[in-house]
Image: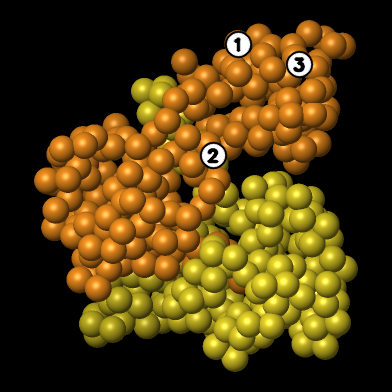
Chain colours: A yellow, B orange
Amino acid sequence: MPKVADSTIRRLSLYLRFLEEFEERGTATVSSDALAARGGTTSAQVRKDLSFFGSFGKRGLGYRVPELASRLRQILGLGGRYRVALIGAGKIGSALYQHHGFRDRGFDIVAVFDRDPQKIGHVWNGVPVADVAQLETILGAQSVDIAILVTPAEAAQETADRLVRLGIKAILNFAPVQLSVPHEVAVKTVNLVLELEALSYSLTNR
Amino acid sequence: MPKVADSTIRRLSLYLRFLEEFEERGTATVSSDALAARGGTTSAQVRKDLSFFGSFGKRGLGYRVPELASRLRQILGLGGRYRVALIGAGKIGSALYQHHGFRDRGFDIVAVFDRDPQKIGHVWNGVPVADVAQLETILGAQSVDIAILVTPAEAAQETADRLVRLGIKAILNFAPVQLSVPHEVAVKTVNLVLELEALSYSLTNR
């Protein structure tokens, strides 16, 4: 398969969200125009995004909702469930833990770590907050697919290195640093302050 | 000024973060190689990113840290302070409210709204949680620069429309929808589930 741009993957997720709404309402088919309107893009872009993955829909008839939804779930790897470790049990970590959207989409946080003795030992809905010093012991005994990293900046790279050595291939990083990882490890960085600074730039340079 | 890519603005924020660390340590100059290493990029990219905004540094001497930091703060519009309204006082909203990084970088959350009667009337560090029905009254009386939108998906577009009518020109959106706004309004969307789905895609298509 050709390398597909991150922006395409992002739109596939959005299309899937809309298709699932249509599924719930029992709508049988949807046009690329309707998908485009909900994804903030054009119908040509919808067709291009889907064309990476095969042939969908019929000219003039649109896409069959259950089929396209099912195919997108398959493309995005959303058939089963993912086991997720959360590193950092502060306010953001706790809010993420309680975020229903994750579990609803198949992402189960099964291990939580922190370095703060005041947090270690608390039990979050059956999951104990463990000492991050125990990362290797605990994640050696139970495999996880994805790590969510919510550590302070200065601890992020070292923690990422440990996760990589444990064989974890996907990291969602909230620490305000660019992580350096081997190319086979996927990293997505969410940096909230950077987003606000980009808005500040827009407000200043208009 | 030419249109500058979002990815460039993002790196400028990262460079500034590193420069401020150097400033604290009293380092007088920094090479583009050092900046590049910290930004996860190349020195050629550093020079290109900066070239949009003028001429910086001297060949062989590197960049003067306080000067470049000061210029980047100016480019990013980070001299003063921004007044921010938070719409949505749930778990994510509350974690954002308590996020020190925002205030440290000049973003002050001065108004908080929710539609849940159980939340309305609580006071967060001196800021009352107001009924979102009062958005126009309250934001009409005190101007804000930026809105952070943390509403459920179905309320997001309508709330964004109201913010736009109030003259707000910058929105940080956490709702899982693509907002449609006039082109003079800057929107940054942070969609945590989409980030996890992009990781799922990477794990599936390797």
- Measuring 50% from the left and 81% from the top, which residue is drawn there? A103
Mark 2 in CB contact with mark 1 (< 8 angstroms): no
Outermost front residue: B126
In depth, the one of B102 and A165 nearer the eye is B102
The Cα–Cα distance between marks 3 and 1, rounded to whole angstroms, is 13 Å
What's the residue type where badge 3 is placed? Answer: Tyr
Q: Tell which tag, 3 or 1, sits nearer the viewer.
A: 3
Q: Quadrant of residue B80?
A: top left
Q: Nearer the viewer, residue B30 or A91?
A: A91
Q: Residue at x 75, y 41 (%)?
A: B40
Against A15, residue B35 (above or below) is above
CB within 8 Å, label 3 to label 1 = no
Look at mark 1 in the image and give the residue it sits on. Answer: B54
Specify the quadrant of the image occupied by residue A30: bottom left
Residue type at mark 2 is Asp
In the rendered structure, the residue with mark 3 lies on which chain?
A: B
Label 3 and label 2: CA atoms lie apart by 25 Å
Q: Nearer the viewer, mark 2 or mark 1?
A: 2
Q: Position of residue B85 (x, y in %)?
A: 31, 46
User: Under tag 3, what secondary structure?
Assistant: strand
User: At 79% from the left edge and 23% from the top edge, which residue is drawn?
Assistant: B26
Q: Quick check: B158 left or right of A191?
A: left
Tell me the SS state at disc 1: loop
Q: Nearer the viewer, residue B176 or A32?
A: B176
Q: Residue tagged by mark 2?
A: B104
Residue for badge 3: B63
Decide if residue B154 is on the left or right side of residue A190.
left
Could you tell me if residue A130 is visible in this image?
yes
Q: Is residue A31 visible?
A: no
Is A40 above or below relative to B22? below
